[in-house]
Amino acid sequence: MHLAISLEDVVEMIPDGARVMLSGFMGVGTPDGIVRALADAGKKDLTMIVNDAARPHCGVGPLVKAGCVKKFIGSHIGVNPDVQEKMRAGEIEVELVPQGTLVERIRAGGMGLGGVLTPTGLGTLIAEGKPTVEVEGKTYLLETPLRADFALIAARSCDYVGNLTYMLTATNFNPIMALAADVVIAEPEEIVPVGVIPPDSVKTPGVLVDHVIKRAA
């Protein structure tokens, strides 16, 4: 792991066409500095795995507005008109996934599982073309795991070996996405000496974190 790499380093590291998990819930718990840097750099053809489309100015919104996103995988686009317009124009492919299913697919990807069985979506468009499995007389959809090339996560604090802690609801998708990507990049608000974060407050151990940058002011 490398501490305090620059945003410029992150931009160089993530190529066009990458598959990227981005933490956050309506922009809360999103690494805003990384998002702005990628948008300013004009990255192209990214597949973004994110809970929601947030709004044009936050979350994944700046990447959408800058034309960086080719495909969006998430649970909700209802308050981001940019995503809706680009979807209607055929400029962005949108795969809507029920929120509970989304987080379990990411968890499955992180844990090395072959999929998730869920009744959510049976009898709807979500189920079209997906295999089903019967368990004790009940039918479930088989949802496949989700993994990414990069996970971009935000943290409240990070120590010198990469242990992360989060603040309240800003925790959201951060810990689970940190399990499910080849490269994990964290943007903390502060970097502190080892021991400042109590061991039982560590939500993502440093062994999972590849790179850390300082959160932009």
Image (tube, rainbow, N blue to C red):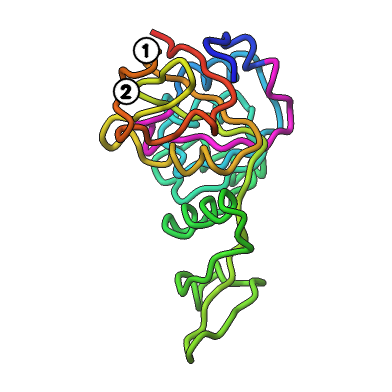
Identify the residue position indicated by label 1 in the image: 192
User: Which amino acid does the dot numbered 2 rest on?
Assistant: Ile
What secondary structure is found at the residue carrying circle 2?
loop
At horizontal 48% and vertical 91% (from top left) the residue drawn is 137
Residue found farthest to the left? 168
- Location of residue 159 with respect to 94 vertically, above or below: above
Badge 2: few (under 14), some or many (20 or more) residues near its Cα, within 10 Å? Answer: some
**Which quadrant of the structure image shows residue 179?**
top right
Q: Amino acid at mark 1?
A: Val
When the figure is inspected, residue 32 is found, relative to residue 98, above or below; the finding is above
**Dot label at residue 197:** 2
Image coords of residue 23 (percent x, y): 46, 35
**Tag count:** 2
**On the picture, is 5 further left or further right than 51?**
right
CA neighbours of label 1 inside 10 A, class few (<14), some (14 to 19), many (20+): some
Dominant secondary-structure state across the stretch colored magenta: loop
Q: Which label number is shown at residue 157?
A: none
- Give the residue at the far bottom of this rendering: 137
Residue 74 falls inside the magenta stretch: no
Q: Locate residue 118, reporting x and y percent.
A: 48, 71
Q: Which quadrant: the N terminus?
A: top right
Say which of 27 and 10 sits in front. 10
What segment is highlighted magenta in the picture? Answer: 12-30
